[in-house]
Image: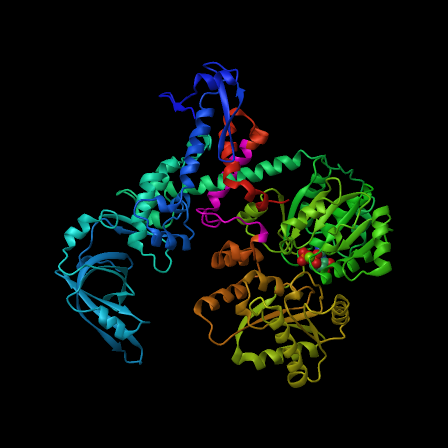
Amino acid sequence: MPEVKIGADGKLQLPEDILAGLGLGAGDTVLIEMDGGKAVLSRAVAACPGVAAGQLRDAISRKNLEASMRFIRGVGPKMAELLAKKGIQVVEDALYHLPSRYEDRRRLRLIEELRPGWVEVFHAEVQVADAVVAKGGRRFFEAVVGDDSGSIVLKWFHCNPRYMKGVWQPGKKGIFTGEVVLYGSRREIHHPEVEWLKEGEDIASVVAGDPVNFGRTVPVYPLTEGLHQKALRKVLKEVVDSCSRSVATHIPDDIMVRRSLMPLTDALNEVHFPGNDADITVLNSHATKAHRTLAFDELFFFQLGLALKRQGTSLEDGIPFQISHKYTRPLLKMLPYSLTAAQKRVLSEIKQDMSCPAPMYRLVQGDVGSGKTIVALLAALLAVENDCQAAIMAPTELLAEQHFLNIHKLCEQLGIAVRLLSLAVKGKERTATLEAIASGTVQIVVGTHAVIQEKVLFRRLGLGIIDEQHRFGVLQRGGLKKKGACPHILVMTATPIPRSLAMTVYGDLSLSVIDELPPGRTPVATRVCSESQRSQVYRLIKDEVRSGRQAYLICPLVEESEKSELRAATQMAEHLAAEIFPELRIGLLHGRLKPEEKETVMASFKARELDVLVATTVIEVGIDVPNATVMVVEHADRFGLSQLHQLRGRVGRGSGHSRCILLAGGSLSDEARQRLKVMEETTDGFRIAEADLELRGPGDFLGTRQAGLPDFRVAHILRDARILEEARHEAFALVAKDPGLSAIENSLLRDELLWRWGGRLELAVVA
Ligand code: ADP
Ligand code: MG
């Protein structure tokens, strides 16, 4: 193997024989590409100093980052195992295992100096320690520790007193950390952390001998059982010192300057082991320049991927539609209402897209009841006017059927052929439907995911609409697209995703928001009730039914298990019919019913042949029965807020005053009560979604990975929303200037994008 050197000027010095073999001479520039783990010298490119050397340097750095943690000094097999439990296997994992908070240990304080409201670190000796029973019978463990300046009380509320007494022996010395609270006028610390000194050990020498853990602002890392803060700090110090050099970014210089970012190596050093002048408050809110740099870097590459993806789709040939108003105008005349300003605006955005040669990729977000269906239908009519077919896909049989009935009723009068295609359509009817779709006699197909099955062939699909997008996987979205030659795609969702999150998940789609409800709706009055108020709740249902209204009763979500959900709903329906409302007509709707059974139940509820409908969450999306004015949700605390909001959207659809009762279990935590209170306070889906996102984090919020949300290592979508926007702006501007990132000065950036996201990018965006 010939040796390759990098010269003082940063250029690669290739041996003569290799150059000769490539037909190159001194001064020529060569591109090195990585093929698996091997560097391959490929084409000669126009003079661009630095690219070849840069590629080799990157290849070496990446190898270093992929090195196992076992090669790190001080990491034995046992430590390696503990680290692996925390997801830290290679050097890069460790570098990006960032502190969750920081402690100011630049100087250990005297007890007399401890400030209420601060997390303080001090050194002291145990004076007394014992279990205590307070006046009200509450038990806890208390210790008093002191130094020359005074003493302070430490308390533990949940612990084993015998064990504690064994550990907290008078005379023992240690270093204590915890938040100082005021109890009356007395300062206390509850559940402090302690690092004991060995007997005879002297504090000054401990502090001096451990510059990682003392005399500085120290990082506090997320841990796992068996992994201790002090030890992890030492490992990370070693990794950061020896390996952070290998981390680099190829974000163009002008962006680095404009966004005032710092080199990644420096940023990692600062984030793990901040300098002595760092402000603890800024550190703890993850807002230092170093934190911002790391978040920007991560979000920039993600947005760059989305921008490229979008660029790719806009290069496809779509079908530019003419706007003739042939069907849309008569339809608007037929409606008993006029469109809201928001509906009109979104519709014109859709028209604008569909009259372009590039296919549309648009997400319409509108809160429950904002009137998305009619917007979808109008878009479908545009396709029909252009001699194209449209397909509308809904996530459940129930919803598909309901859409079909509504749309069919309207289209019949316009002379447009609409067909339903779902699992419920079988046998001869199915064959006939498939034939009609293939021959083009059907102009609008409404269905479930049956629409994207292999056997379904369209004559000329011009528009694919997906309702309630969040219920579908990414794959299905792609599936519909493949049913035509680049049809326009319209995606609709009622999950009011905060804008920042929408940009992340659906970053390759354009976004329209229907941010206005049709006039005349009274907001649904919502109340959280406890078990003790159950009889009042039943009385409310009775009263409403007596005045001609109907009610929903939603049964709990039992840990994802469809079986127990079913049992709960069935039992509830039986109990109500037999004991509570013997005089009322009770229906039952759950996921296990056959499609035609569901339809029968829904139809009789709609026709007012049932007074109360007991249902599981199958009712969640899109069902429209304006006469239903009460909804009771059992065990509301087990639902996500956004889901409750969706459920609640089933009432308040008519002009009558509607109510939603959230029944919560007896022993609700403060936090759960707080959470449900949001539902009482607002009917604004966006505010609810924000609250939900804050409380549960993005992964949970959208349910699963399938929503396409990547796991970010640094960035936090809410906290870093500003940075996300900046990163998006820069990434999209860059791709606009250099579509495909093919300019030579962007080649390292492009390599890096592929390396970072590789296969994951495909998953993260629309297929
Ligand atoms: P969602 O956005 O939740 O899918 P829908 O499309 O089901 O909402 O509409 C909810 C109800 O509002 C339907 O009964 C529909 O007929 C009605 N609607 C839609 N647009 C308007 C409007 N501009 N004015 C009055 N009612 C409307
Ligand atoms: Mg809908």
Q: Is residue 204 left or right of residue 318?
A: left
Tally of numbered tags = 0
Specify whether residue 518 is in view: no
Is residue 482 or residue 227 the one in the foreground? 227
Residue 541 x/y as whole percent: 64, 77
Quick check: is 721 in the magenta stretch? yes
Q: Quadrant of ligand 2?
A: bottom right
Q: Report which quarter residue 312 is drawn in.
A: top right
Is residue 697 or residue 558 the one in the foreground? 558
Q: Is residue 732 left or right of residue 194?
A: right
Q: Which residue: 25% across, 76% down? A: 132
Specify whether residue 98 is in view: yes
Q: Which residue: 62% across, 54% down? A: 470
Stretch of the chain drawn in magenta: 706-734
Residue 147 x/y as whole percent: 14, 61
Q: Is residue 493 left or right of residue 105?
A: right
Q: Is residue 137 above or below residue 252?
A: below
* Residue sticking out furthest to the front: 1
Q: Is residue 680 left or right of residue 10?
A: right
Q: How is the image coloured?
A: rainbow
Residue 669 x/y as whole percent: 44, 70
Residue 321 x/y as whole percent: 77, 38
Tell me the quadrant of the picture where the C terminus can be found.
top right
Quick check: is 484 in the magenta stretch? no
Tell me the quadrant of the picture where the N terminus can be found.
top left
